[in-house]
Image (spheres, helix red, strand yellow):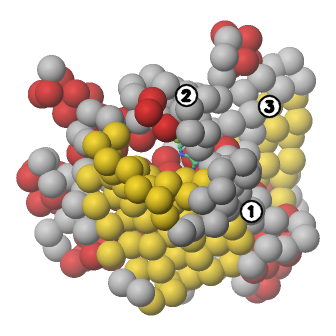
Amino acid sequence: PDTVRLLSSSQVITSVLNVVKELMENSLDAGASSVDIKLENYGLDRVEVRDNGHGIKAADTPVMAVRHFTSKICSHEDLERLETYGFRGEALGSICAVAEVVVTTKTEEDEISTQYTLNSTGEIVSQKPSHLGQGTTVSVLKLFKNLPVRRQYYSSTKKCKEELKKVNELLMAYAIIKPDLRLTLIHNKVVVWQKAKVADHRSALIATLGPSTVANLLPCHHHQEQPEIVLEGFFPKPGADYSSTSSSNPDKTFIFVNNRPVHQKDVMKLLRQHYTAQYPD
Ligand code: ADP
Ligand code: MG
């Protein structure tokens, strides 16, 4: 059973980027308006995500990392009007199988925060009072310690730097779609990137990409009812040249479906072609 758990967890948790994404989405689901992401050694030694969200109720903590536990949906109908990023209850438990996890949390009702140390099956092995404010901090230590091949993937500095860049770009996507969110990314105690709370999408775009890039972006919006689908896109105007900016998203295309950043290259290309074709240059 340990091998099965490790194998299926390694399918869910595939990279540093993926750990940051899962923790980030949990923070957003918790209603956080401020999220701090700290990495050490490109996330391999530590990924820590701290939020000021609603925290985890004491009654939920024993099961928070149990496979398929989720506090976010109660019935099948809930799935049809999904307003949270998470609903499978898979992330936290899977991270426990491939790293050491410590969760510190405090709800509005709690007088003080509590720090929980979890084991590889997601059970609490110890807990102690802590001093953090309202919200949740998840620390992921020694990622992929038991998956040497996956760890090997990060053995070159080049790969590590690419991964850090991808993490940064993922955070930029959330920054754009969530203007009122405050975000910081810290690597080895150095602030790599940060974004303050701003008033609207346009200000968020400018804060994230800079005014000159934004001047060359074409915003697109599409709303469909039943089932409700909101597509939000920012595409470079035809002829805009970003060749000087090194990035894993050189086309500066940002697409969100129901607030979720979309990264599939072929989907991005198709939508970019569709929307920019109508635009006279
Ligand atoms: P899911 O997000 O699909 O519900 P996860 O494994 O990511 O599953 O998280 C399990 C549960 O742990 C969540 O449903 C939630 O109750 C709790 N949780 C995890 N992270 C946070 C957080 N940052 N703030 C509040 N609750 C959290
Ligand atoms: Mg989740």
Q: Is mark 2 within 8 Å of ligand 1?
A: yes
x and y percent of residue 154 in the render? 20, 65
For badge 2, the amino acid type reads Thr
Residue linked to disc 2: 70
Mark 2 Cα within 10 Å, few/some/many (few <14, many 20+)?
some
In this view of the protein, which residue sits in the foreground, 232 or 19?
19
Residue depicted at 79% across the width and 73% down the height: 197
Rendered image: mark on residue 111: none
x and y percent of residue 267 in the render? 59, 42
> Of the residues under marks 2 and 3, which one precedes in the sequence?
2
When the figure is inspected, residue 137 is found, relative to residue 195, above or below; the finding is: above
Give the spatial CA distance, label 2 vs label 3.
24 Å
Mark 3 Cα within 10 Å, few/some/many (few <14, many 20+)?
few
Residue depicted at 72% across the width and 48% down the height: 109
Q: Secondary structure at mark 2?
A: loop
Residue depicted at 56% across the width and 32% down the height: 59
Residue linked to disc 1: 33
Quadrant of image for the N terminus: top left
Relative placement, left or right, of 117 versus 237 is left
For badge 1, the amino acid type reads Ser
> Of the residues under marks 3 and 1, which one precedes in the sequence?
1
Give the spatial CA distance, label 3 vs label 1.
24 Å
Residue linked to disc 3: 229
Locate residue 136: give its quadrant: bottom right
